[in-house]
Image (cartoon, rainbow, N blue to C red):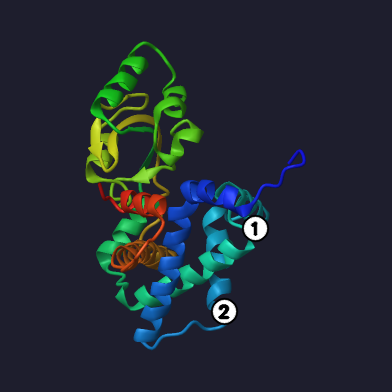
Amino acid sequence: MEGKPVRMSDLEPLLLEMAGTQALAEIVLDRRLELEMTRRGLSLDAGAVEQERRLLLATLSPNADDAVRLLSELRTRQGLGRTRFDALLRRNAALRRLVRDEVQVTDAALRQAWEALHGERRQPRLIVTPTLAQAEHALRRVARGESFADIAVDMSTDVSASRGGLIEPISAGDPSFPPAVREALFSMQAGEVSRPIMVDGGFALLRLERLVPGTGRTIEEEREPLTEFSRRRQERLLMEQLARRLVDEASLTILDDSLHDAWRRSRGGE
């Protein structure tokens, strides 16, 4: 640059600080998965990785062209070049194979899936703050007439912040949201804002945007897609739990002091 070289030694400390823990977590998980697959005598068939790509596209949009576009945008936002994206697909394929036999689609699970897909749902905006004081400050801004969406962009630590806190409609039994959040949401009127709710990572405020009525379809009419939906949802939760456990249980010796400290903080250390 301007006649002076930028060496890898110049970049390395910055890269470690920016993304070192994420890169290390991915490497650790990949190696732990390889060991776990070998220990259980399992392997991936030729179509397992391609299936992961199809499943990912299907979760992004039912429209094939939109799904491809959204995947491209997702890869750009998350820095998923060819190496990391291919590794992500292999990782998910291995995780799915390892948890496959743990999935049980019970009548209760089908009911929960029906509520999520065909029952009444509610779409909120969400603000998450690290402290109660910040949540109460956000609530005061709402009371002064400021837009909840603008406050979410300004203050929320949730991934929905860039969308003004808007999240997809959720059902009363959606297990991906804490019971306290669901209970508050289903007791609110459209346009109402909740009091601060304690959640993992801080405190949440909700604003109910709209009620989404049920479809009128029965469980028996939709049994096959409900079974598939329930299976995928359980797989996802089990995969996340297994990935977290494998990384948390890894025995690491990190020689770089800054990476060591960052790793310890990322795993909940002091």
As drawn, the label of residue 5 is: none
Where on the picture, by quarter, is residue 35?
bottom left
Position of residue 111 relative to residue 73, above or below, is below
Label 2 sits on residue: 47
Label 1 sits on residue: 64
- Give the residue at x 30% y 33%: 130
Which marked residue is nearer to the observer: mark 2 or mark 1?
2
- Give the residue at x 57% y 60%: 57
Q: Residue furthest bottom?
A: 41
- Give the residue at x 55% y 54%: 60
Give percent across and percent down for residue 6. Answer: 67, 47
Q: Is residue 7 left or right of residue 181?
A: right
- Amino acid carrying label 2: it is Gly
> Does residue 3 appear in the picture of this structure?
yes
Of residues 254 and 181, the one nearer the viewer is: 254
Q: Residue furthest right?
A: 3
- Amino acid carrying label 1: it is Ala
- Local crowd at mark 2 within 10 Å, few (<14), some, or many (≥20)? few
Give percent across and percent down for residue 252. Answer: 34, 66
- Local crowd at mark 1 within 10 Å, few (<14), some, or many (≥20)? few
Q: CA distance from mark 2 to mark 1?
A: 20 Å
Of residues 226 and 170, the one nearer the viewer is: 170
Q: Secondary structure at mark 1?
A: helix
Where on the picture, by quarter, is residue 104?
bottom left
Q: Is residue 138 left or right of residue 225?
A: left
- Give the residue at x 40% y 41%: 213
Give percent across and percent down for residue 71. Answer: 61, 54
